[in-house]
Image (spheres, coloured by chain):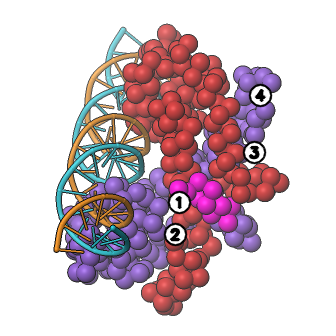
Chain colours: A purple, B red, C cyan, D orange
Amino acid sequence: MPGQHTLAETENQVTTRLAGMDLDFDAMAVTSNLFRAANSARNYLERTVLARVNLTWTAFVVLWVAWIWETGETREIAAETGVSKATLSGVLATLEGRGLLTRTRGKHDGRLVVVELTPAGKRVMKRLFPEFNAAEREVTRLIAKEHLGDAAQYLRTITTATQV
Amino acid sequence: MPGQHTLAETENQVTTRLAGMDLDFDAMAVTSNLFRAANSARNYLERTVLARVNLTWTAFVVLWVAWIWETGETREIAAETGVSKATLSGVLATLEGRGLLTRTRGKHDGRLVVVELTPAGKRVMKRLFPEFNAAEREVTRLIAKEHLGDAAQYLRTITTATQV
DNA sequence: TCACGATCGTTCGGGTCCGAACTATCTGCA
DNA sequence: TGCAGATAGTTCGGACCCGAACGATCGTGA
């Protein structure tokens, strides 16, 4: 997983350290850069557009999903956002504490919890999302417009290959 | 950031909710799938190959960087791995506690901390890395071999665009 | 030689991440 | 009708993530 060292430097060093090993450098490059890119992009979004409303990346995603689909059950939101139900519980607690959404038990199935944005939550999302989308353009500005579709598709295949 | 809903469903819903807004769906697709892919791949690696040695993804990356470059200063490891120095302090404390590496103050500059793998740490990495690389192949198995280079390059551009 | 600004790493507080274990609820079958 | 298995969400403990603040150290310029 190369970072500051160049790709060539890293491959040289790895080859030296694992002489004779059959290594897949391409797979290595994709995996390591996936995490660097995700970490860097998340930090960028949290430092800029999301900092203005004191939201983390995941908190924003949860609000977005609940906003886009009007209302939702926590199991659906967990599936949609890709975080575990344990994590979602904590994030929802944070957002509920900030008055951005509410949680209520399902009327017909007591196991379910239904999430709904408050008026304040809806206002935040209405104002925030266009700015967020602009920041998303910043994140991808060095990828040619006609290649964004391919880039997104490569990422989807990684999720497919690794999901439970 | 689509998840379980199809791309078309999501775009329809977003367009409805933000009628008249000029949205960049391609940038949105790349960003949302970047996080889903990273989260899913990390969870997969932590549940499989890394679980056998009780390591998290980041702990592994830190060990890998220190192993590949023999020894290193924490500021270099932070730059190489893409995590903040605050985070690295905690991760190094965890790994030092497990006896996998040591930390010592620089001889010529008392501000620096030098990291070195212990013999146990080196043994873990020697045995683990080929298995880890095989798991990396699993992560990327749905991307055509000849497209892995492109995929890695798209990810590098995202890091470049968002790094401080 | 000394003071000031810069750099390095750590700590703190708040947020996230998840597996395991738990409680509550629902469904299907005998 | 009752029970067992499945499902849903929460809690717990441990690990990570980072900005801000802090203490320690170094380098530079007056």
Magenta region, main secondary structure: helix
Counting from the top left corner in percent of width and height, residue B83 is at: 49, 40
- CA–CA distance in space, label 1 to label 3: 21 Å
Report helix, strand or loop for mark 2: loop
> Type of residue at label 4?
Met
Within 10 Å of the Cα at label 2, are there few (<14), some (14-19), or many (20+) other Cα atoms?
many
In the image, what residue occupies the spot 50% across and 43% down?
Answer: B47
Q: Which residue is mark 2?
A: B3
In the image, what residue occupies the spot 64% across and 23% down?
Answer: B126
- CA–CA distance in space, label 3 to label 4: 15 Å
Q: Which residue is mark 4?
A: A21
- CA–CA distance in space, label 2 to label 4: 37 Å
Q: How many marks?
A: 4
D2 sits left or right of D27 in the view: left
Are tags 3 and 4 found on a single chain? yes
Residue B59 drawn in magenta: no
> Type of residue at label 2?
Gly
| Of the image marks 3 and 4, the number of the one nearer the N terminus | 4
Counting from the top left corner in percent of width and height, residue B101 is at: 49, 19
Q: Which residue is mark 3?
A: A26
Residues under numbered marks 1 and 2 in contact, where contact means CB atoms less than 8 Å apart: yes
- CA–CA distance in space, label 1 to label 2: 8 Å
| Of the image marks 1 and 2, the number of the one nearer the N terminus | 2
Chain holding disc 4: A
Q: Which residue is mark 1?
A: B36
